[in-house]
Structures are given as C-alpha cells and as structure tokens.
Image (spheres, rainbow, N blue to C red):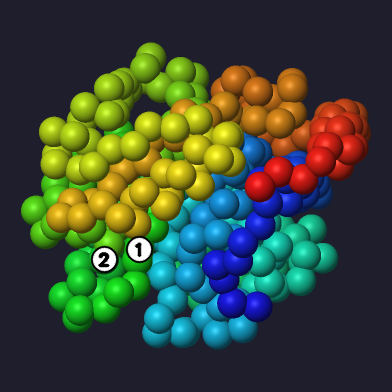
C-alpha cells in the first residue's frame, strides 16, 4: 500500500488505541523503555503516517517519498508501532523490542528496521539533519516534503536553534516540524528544569510559521498538517499541546513514566482502560 490514504476520524482514533496498546505491551515485555512520551505523540504520528506523509512501505528507497526525521528518538515504542502498523514489518515483531539480536533497539538506526530515515539518540542533533535534508531536496528542485517530530528536550539544545535559524534563512517551506509539547521530561516539569516557554514566540522570532493545536484532537492535527502544506517562504512549526502518558489514566501527567516499564498489574490496568476506550469508540457512528 502507498500512503497517504483517507480515513475517518473514528478509524484514526481506533488506530491510536491500537498503537497505545502496542506501546505498553512492548515496554512491559522489554522491562524498559519510554512509555510517557510515546503515548503523547500517538495522534500526531497516526495522522501524519496515514493521511499526509507520502511513503511506500514496500519501496523504502522511493525517490518521491516524503522524509520523516525523528528528533525525539527515545520514543521508539511509538516509532516502531507506527512503522509496523503501516506495513514496514510484522506487528508480531514488536514484542522483540530491546531484545538481544532484535532490529528494534532502544534508539533507532537508519539501517533497521525498514522505514527509518536516520539514526538517533542524542537530543537536538536530528533537527539539523531535517533541515539539511529539506535544503538538499529544495536545492534539487524536488517536491518532496520533510517532516520532523521534536520535543522540549530537543529544544533545550542549542544545536536545535541553529537548525531552526538556518531553516528560516533558506526559506525551507518544504519543512514542517511537529513539537510534542507535553511539558514534562525525565527530571520533572520542563519549566523547572530548563524552561522553553513561550515556544510560539521563539519560533516566530526565528521567522517560522507557527500553528498551535491540541495534539490529541485528530481534526486539529489534520487541519494543521493540511495548512502547513500550503504555507510558503518559511518553514512551519506545529506546536501540539499534549499530555505525557496520554490514554492511560495513571500515567498521564506523571514524569515518573518518562522511562519506566509497567509491571504486570500496571499492564493489566492499562489494557483494561484501552479496551474500554475501544468499546466506547466502536459503538459510535462513523465521523467524517
């Protein structure tokens, strides 16, 4: 299957629940990983990979594909889930996460699994790569778009702002960066550790287009990604207000779940909550 495809909001929300189930099951099976920030990024990735990103899981070197550069690379449970659920590798491989010999290591490699454009781990570096890829494509006159997913941790790194400055200087209107703005990091509240507020004014002062959305509202994510494709002369930042641990009540807004695996009882409770959400959503009429 070649993407993008058109889905209803209900279809995307059901896929989001499936993805959240993947995330907690993977981290539980591994006994380690990063569930909090993975859960906060789900609606952004579900919408992008299904409805906007031009890609073909059967042809990962397709010249006309859009490029997705993950700056927030520790959220591999979310990254591997969305790749699997759009056809890059079998979903049953997800439970090999962080196991010796598995392709699904704690931080991603551009060589495995299929669908990764760039290796990552150190915060801040891949914003520069996204900018360089966008500049290269634009210089060649290609119409491919470049998307990035970043976070407050990345934006605490000076290298990110050098890239942001460069992207505006070169008028990279083929670059759209989504900020998963959940306001928590491993050491607690972002504003207590190293504040990045106000992000909108910072991006604007660097001469970017800025769109501000609820990152869990599918309609708003769709509208922002669609609008970003029409904006010219400058790159676009989509600042998505999100909730760390979204979808699992006892993980939401708790920095302790940044990098902790659920135990057996936690997993049971998390899956029960997701089952309840799925049953409730399935009973509703389809939405456009």
Q: Secondary structure at mark 2?
A: helix
Looking at the image, residue 96 lies above or below residue 267: below
Asked if one can make out residue 135 in the rendered structure from this viewpoint, the answer is yes
Q: Is there CB contact under 8 Å for labels 1 and 2? A: yes
Disc marking residue 254: none
Looking at the image, residue 147 lies above or below residue 34: below
For residue 281, which quarter of the picture? top right
Horizontal side of 140 relative to 93 (left or right) equals left
Q: Residue at x 58, y 41 (%)?
A: 218
Q: Residue furthest top?
A: 192
Give the residue at mark 1: 146
- How dense is the environment of label 1, judged by Cα within 10 Å: few (below 14), some, or many (20 and up)? many
Q: Earlier in the sequence, mark 1 or mark 2?
A: 2
Residue 74 placement (x, y as % from top left): 52, 47
Residue 29 placement (x, y as % from top left): 81, 49
Query: Considering the image in quadrants, where does the N terminus appear?
Result: bottom right
Towards the viewer: 224 or 194? 224
Residue 49 placement (x, y as % from top left): 56, 60
Looking at the image, residue 120 lies above or below residue 137: above
Disc marking residue 134: 2
Horizontal side of 99 relative to 125 (left or right) equals right
Q: Residue at x 28, y 68 (%)?
A: 133
Q: Residue at x 58, y 34 (%)?
A: 216
């Amino acid at each position: 299957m070649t993407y993008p495809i058109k889905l209803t909001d209900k279809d995307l929300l059901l896929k989001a629940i499936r993805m959240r189930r993947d995330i907690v099951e993977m981290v539980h099976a591994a006994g380690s990983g990063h569930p909090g920030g993975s859960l906060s990024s789900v609606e952004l990735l579900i919408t992008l990979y299904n409805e906007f990103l031009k890609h073909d899981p059967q042809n990962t070197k397709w010249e006309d594909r859009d490029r997705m550069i993950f700056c927030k690379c520790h959220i591999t449970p979310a990254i591997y889930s969305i790749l699997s659920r759009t056809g890059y590798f079998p979903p049953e491989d997800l439970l090999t996460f962080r196991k010796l010999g598995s392709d699904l290591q704690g931080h991603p490699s551009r060589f495995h699994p299929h669908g990764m454009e760039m290796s990552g781990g150190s915060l801040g570096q891949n914003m520069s790569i996204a900018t360089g890829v966008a500049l290269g494509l634009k210089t060649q006159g290609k119409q491919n778009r470049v998307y990035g997913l970043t976070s407050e941790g990345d934006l605490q790194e000076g290298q990110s702002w050098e890239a942001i400055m460069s992207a505006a200087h070169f008028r990279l209107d083929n670059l759209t960066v989504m900020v998963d703005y959940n306001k928590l990091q491993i050491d607690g509240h972002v504003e207590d550790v190293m504040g990045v507020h106000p992000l909108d004014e910072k991006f604007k002062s660097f001469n970017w287009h800025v769109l501000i959305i609820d990152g869990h509202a599918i309609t708003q994510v769709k509208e922002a990604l669609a609008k970003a494709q029409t904006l010219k002369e400058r790159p676009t930042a989509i600042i998505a207000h999100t909730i760390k641990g979204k979808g699992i009540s006892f993980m939401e807004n708790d920095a302790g779940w940044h990098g902790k695996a659920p135990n057996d009882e936690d997993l049971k409770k998390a899956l029960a909550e997701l089952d309840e959400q799925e049953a409730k959503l399935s009973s509703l009429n389809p939405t456009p």
